[in-house]
């Protein structure tokens, strides 16, 4: 009952606000300004998807905003299409531009990507100015029609406000749902750690392009609102690079990654100059100084400041109190149900005796310039075994794991997993074929929760796409419940029960290792690659790890591990491969390896205390 | 020479150290042992001034250094080889070593050269690679460079944070041999290690931390035979061996 009241609270509040604003604000000047700030807010919500969720810096948001505005303006004035059709066209044409920009540029990152997006903005503005037949050049497009409902024209700013407000609410609602969905988590995984996102099964290129397209689509709708409100006139100089920078400032100022922050930032920076008008000539100076001050005193944006207010903390606890518990209960209502139906997952079967070859590596080599990090290695891993790969630092162990998991393309050689060739395949494909890994220096999605980390691990076993995620359809809800249940089972298995909602970064070191293991297990691997799983663990923690490794193995998951802790390696491995200078120097059971003189000289050493 | 009395250090709202007291005498190797999150690294960071204690007192050579800035503590003669090596990746081995001597006041070229020769004497590999960039080195070489950089400070005491982390057994043995050698040459050492057995084999005394408190403090020989230590930190391996036996027999049955 309580939950129901809470769920109704926000919609009721929103409807009230939307109905009240035009009653209170009667001057069309202010109403226009509100409409303008809504248009900016929507564009900033879009930018927040690319920048805040996905962590990619784009300086072309005003260009996409312009694409939306011009698309709808041209279609409605030249072709006389209805304004509502213009809205869909604005969204899709802008999104298409996002894809077109994304494909060539998303291999870049950081400031290189930013530069490429600036280039796109400049090109667009040149087109707007020079393709006069289409855009009417620098004169711009005038007399853009207003949207109609039946014969009623939403002409005055007060009525148009309803259109703007409803768009903003729906798009915000979509962005909120997106954040807590398979697609949103994929975006955030890319932001947190692109390499780990790939090996966890997220197709990083695809999702980056999707983020760009969606962000551009949002900007397109913002542009549509802009074109059909206020002056009903658009010209190229509005959609400038400076405007893109402005949108970036709005988003960052509001708090990058925060949905409400983007709206607050956009509204604040649209209204502030108007409020400061009384300062006459010097108002721009105060405006700029205000922005600088906010950036200095609120490094995490307005949202960051609000988040830390005691009142908002209490509010949030109140808000989350039931829903979080409810989610947890709902998720644990049907544990193992989904897990059981999944053929490969945690099925207790004996693979020990089968001896079937799972992974074959033939003549594998990786050269970095003149350095032969791996130089022709042959190796097989049999199903159901625990195999160790050992060797001195720099002997090529991690390089081999990186080639197996698709992070490096081998210079030569072949790799096949369960009979399928995986040489040179991308890491997310390899993950979906049944190989998961952990990293030597833990690579978690640090800012996300423990549960989210494991949910991302389920990425390749779930389907929800962009639109089902945004619209929060029943199919998506059901799938979410399923992967949540599975994730909770896995967290319990590795011993992280009760930590579901902790931020991954905040866990102590040993638990971060366990979490990385849980994330890898979530993809139901046939083969699990572990890169120094015991590094930094003490004797007691190592014992827990050993138990866990044996249990994982009994559940039918084969393990290939790189490790320096000989106590662990010699006791858990069925089979050991030793590397030195990129070549295999020995292979065999623990007993054989321990006695091998070459291995002792190159790696094990002779001091008794350590073996 | 180093005396730590009841220090308490907080990370925001989390108290990492709940009153740690320890002392290191001239010429000793003292091992600081404990699990992850026990507060070993925090103790090191508090001593070196990277973190400020909320309570307690740190005294070095009779001088109160509590709350001093990190660079002033370094100048006072405490050098640190941080966990994870923290080598300047884009600089050469030589540059990294020379940077280790930054905190020294007015030293002659000859003196620096003498110390360099000393470092190269201990790590002949570093001389061979002195033109290479940090990121081109392997894990073992990086650790040697980090220790070499610490030695260049020519400090009275050297703090080593997990020098064996992620290194091959043969390299670990080498690192511990070097630590012993450095100590013989006159540098006092405070050693933080997960590898309790190896650390106690070269140390004079040891302190065992647990959740921010000192649980055990004794001579290394006593700690090595302490039952509690065996169970929790030294890893008698009995558990692992037992697990292995169980698995072997299960497999045998099938």
Image: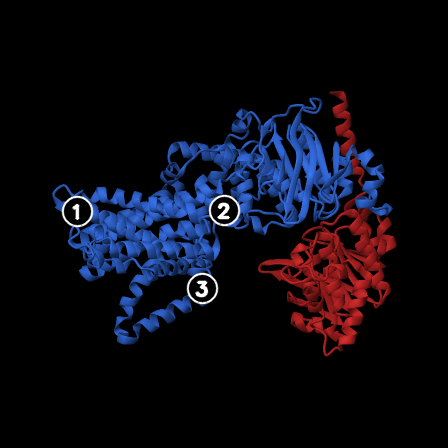
Is B73 on the left or on the right of A187, as rendered?
A: right
Q: CA distance from mark 2 to mark 3?
A: 25 Å
From the rendered image, report the letter of the chain displayed in red. B
The disc label shown at residue A190, or none: 2
The picture quadrant where one finds residue B65 is bottom right
Label 2 vs label 3, nearer the camera:
2
Which of the two marks, 2 or 1, is nearer to us in this view?
Answer: 1
Q: Where on the picture, by quarter, is residue B117?
A: bottom right
The kind of secondary structure element at disc 1 is loop
Pinpoint the chain carrying mark 2: A
Residue B52 seen in the current view:
yes
Q: Which residue is mark 1?
A: A78
Q: How is the image coloured?
A: by chain
- The circle on residue A298 is 3
Viewer-side residue, B14 vs B254: B254
Rendered location of residue A269, percent (x, y): 33, 62
Residue A349 quadrant: top right
Q: Earlier in the sequence, mark 2 or mark 3?
A: 2
B114 vs A36, left or right, is right
Give neighbour class at mark 2: few <14, some 14-19, many 20+ (Cα, 10 Å): many
In the rendered view, does A435 fall on the left or right side of A593? left
Give A562 or A257, whichever is nearer the viewer.
Answer: A562
Given this view, does label 1 or label 3 mark the residue nearer the observer?
1
Question: Residue at (75%, 35%) from the top-left corner?
Answer: A576
Residue A334: give x, y in percent of width and height: 51, 30
């Amino acid at each position: 009952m309580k939950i129901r009241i809470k769920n109704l609270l926000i919609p009721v509040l929103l409807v009230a606000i939307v109905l009240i604003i035009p009653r209170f604000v009667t001057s069309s000047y202010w109403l226009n300004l509100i409409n303008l700030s809504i248009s900016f807010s929507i564009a900033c919500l879009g930018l927040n998807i690319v920048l805040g969720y996905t962590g990619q810096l784009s300086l072309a948001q005003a260009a996409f905003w312009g694409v939306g505005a011009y698309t709808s303006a041209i279609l409605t004035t030249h072709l006389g299409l209805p304004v509502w059709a213009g809205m869909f066209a604005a969204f899709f044409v802008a999104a298409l531009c996002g894809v077109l920009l994304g494909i060539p540029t998303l291999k870049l990152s950081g400031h290189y990507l930013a530069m490429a997006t600036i280039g796109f903005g400049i090109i667009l503005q040149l087109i707007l100015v020079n393709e006069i037949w289409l855009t009417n050049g620098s004169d711009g497009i005038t007399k853009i029609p207003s949207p109609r409902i039946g014969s009623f024209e939403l002409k005055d700013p007060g009525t148009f406000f309803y259109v703007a407000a409803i768009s903003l609410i729906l798009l915000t609602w979509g962005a909120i749902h997106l954040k807590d969905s398979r697609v949103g988590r994929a975006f955030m995984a890319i932001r947190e750690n692109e390499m780990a996102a790939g090996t966890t099964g997220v197709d990083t290129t695809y999702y980056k392009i999707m983020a760009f397209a969606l962000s551009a689509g949002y900007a397109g709708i913002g542009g549509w609102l802009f074109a059909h409100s206020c002056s009903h006139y658009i010209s190229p100089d509005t959609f400038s690079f400076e405007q893109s920078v402005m949108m970036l400032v709005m988003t960052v100022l509001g708090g990058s990654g925060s949905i409400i922050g983007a709206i607050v930032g956009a509204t604040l920076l649209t209204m502030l100059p108007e409020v400061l008008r009384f300062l006459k000539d010097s108002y721009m100076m105060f405006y700029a100084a205000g922005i600088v001050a906010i950036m200095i005193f609120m490094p995490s944006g307005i949202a960051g400041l609000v988040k830390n207010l005691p009142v908002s903390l209490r509010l949030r606890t109140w808000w989350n109190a039931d829903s979080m518990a409810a989610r947890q209960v709902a998720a644990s209502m049907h544990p193992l149900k989904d897990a059981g139906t999944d053929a490969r997952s945690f099925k207790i079967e004996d693979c020990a005796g089968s001896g079937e070859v799972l992974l074959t590596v033939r003549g594998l080599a990786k050269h970095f310039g003149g350095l032969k990090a791996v130089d022709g290695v042959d190796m097989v891993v049999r199903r159901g075994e625990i195999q160790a790969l050992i060797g001195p630092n720099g002997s090529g162990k991690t390089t081999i794991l990186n080639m197996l998991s698709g992070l490096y393309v081998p210079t030569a050689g072949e790799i096949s997993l369960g009979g399928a060739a995986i040489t040179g395949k991308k890491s997310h494909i390899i993950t979906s074929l049944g190989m998961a890994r952990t990293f030597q220096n833990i690579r978690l999605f640090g800012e996300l929760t423990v549960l989210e980390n494991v949910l991302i691990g389920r990425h390749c076993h779930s389907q929800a796409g962009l639109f089902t995620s945004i619209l929060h359809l029943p199919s998506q809800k059901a799938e979410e419940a399923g992967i949540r249940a599975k994730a909770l089972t896995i967290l319990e298995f590795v011993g992280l029960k009760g930590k579901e909602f902790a931020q991954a970064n905040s866990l102590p070191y040993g638990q971060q290792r366990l979490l990385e293991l849980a994330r890898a297990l979530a993809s139901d691997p046939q083969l699990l690659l572990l890169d120094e799983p015991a590094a930094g663990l003490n004797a007691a923690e190592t014992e827990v790890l050993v138990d866990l490794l044996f249990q994982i193995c009994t559940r039918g998951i084969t393990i290939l591990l790189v490790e320096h802790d000989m106590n662990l390696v010699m006791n858990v491995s069925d089979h050991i491969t030793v590397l030195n200078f990129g070549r295999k120097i020995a292979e065999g059971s623990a007993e054989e390896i321990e006695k091998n003189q070459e291995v002792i000289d190159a790696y094990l050493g002779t001091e008794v205390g350590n073996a | 020479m180093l005396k730590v009395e009841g220090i308490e250090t907080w990370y925001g709202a989390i108290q990492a150290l709940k009153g740690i007291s320890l002392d290191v005498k001239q010429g000793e190797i003292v091992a600081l042992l404990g699990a992850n999150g026990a507060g070993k690294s925090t103790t090191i960071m508090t001593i070196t001034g990277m973190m400020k204690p909320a309570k307690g007192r740190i005294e070095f050579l009779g001088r109160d250094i509590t709350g001093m800035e990190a660079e002033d503590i370094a100048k006072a003669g405490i050098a640190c080889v941080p966990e994870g090596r923290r080598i300047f990746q884009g600089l050469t081995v030589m540059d990294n070593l020379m940077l280790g001597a930054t905190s020294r006041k007015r030293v002659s070229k000859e003196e620096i050269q003498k110390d360099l020769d000393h470092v190269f004497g201990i790590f002949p590999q570093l001389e061979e690679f002195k033109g290479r960039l940090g990121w081109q080195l392997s894990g073992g070489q990086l650790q040697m460079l980090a220790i070499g950089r610490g030695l260049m400070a020519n400090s009275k005491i050297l703090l080593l944070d997990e020098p064996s982390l992620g290194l091959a057994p043969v390299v670990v043995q080498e690192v511990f041999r070097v630590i012993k050698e450095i100590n013989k040459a006159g540098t006092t050492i405070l050693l933080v290690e997960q590898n309790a057995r190896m650390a106690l084999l070269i140390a004079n005394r040891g302190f065992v931390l647990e959740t921010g408190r000192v649980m055990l403090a004794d001579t290394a020989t006593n700690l090595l035979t302490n039952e509690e230590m065996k169970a929790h930190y030294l890893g008698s391996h009995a558990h692992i061996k037992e697990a292995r036996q169980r698995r072997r027999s299960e497999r045998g049955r099938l």
